Image (cartoon, rainbow, N blue to C red):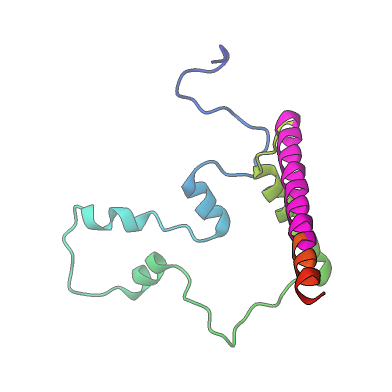
Amino acid sequence: MSEGREQGQPEKRDDASRPVTAAARRERRGTARPASRKDAGRSAEPKSDKVDSTSDSAKKGKPTRTREGKEKRPNIFARFFRYIREVVGELRKVIWPTRKQMVTYTSVVLVFVAFMTALVFGLDIAFAEGVFWLFG
């Protein structure tokens, strides 16, 4: 463990574009649950029979969009650059093999391909000789 950190404290990153907690990810997506929803059942005030429409709409958030109200898609360049950003983000998650693993995997594949080629070649020769012997 590094001496500069206290135990139990997560390592601070310079990259603020990736949220660490699930709540931060939801906020970034724009689908965060309102904080009042958790405390709604534990409030000290008794529930009244009246329905306050202003407080209900504030608790529920935005209504679901209708099909007619579709948002306009960004232009082709914005979509292209977003795609590139997402590709780079996914490639950062990949666990790349080491050089030794890559050499091992490549040699295994080459040996297997050579074996299968030799097997198919041998069977082809054997069947060709059998057909020539049978039909002359």
Residue 92 appears anywhere in the view: yes
Instruction: Out of 5 and 92, give the one closest to the viewer.
Output: 92
Drawn side of residue 34 relative to residue 18, left or right: left
Residue at 46%, 19% (x, y): give it. 7
Q: Quadrant of the N terminus?
A: top right
Between 102 and 111, the residue placed more toward the observer is 111
Q: Residue at x 22, y 52 (%)?
A: 42
Q: Is residue 28 above or below residue 3?
A: below
Q: Position of residue 88 (x, y in %)?
A: 74, 49
* Residue 96 image-quadrant placement: top right
Q: Up-down: is 76 above or below 25?
A: below
**26 in magenta:** no
Residue range in magenta is 99-125
| Label tally | 0
Residue found 30% across the figure and 73% down from its top: 52
Where is residue 15 shown, x and y percent of the image? 67, 38
Residue drawn at (62%, 44%) of the image: 18
Q: Is residue 108 magenta?
A: yes
Residue 114 x %, y %: 78, 47
Q: Is residue 127 left or right of residue 59?
A: right
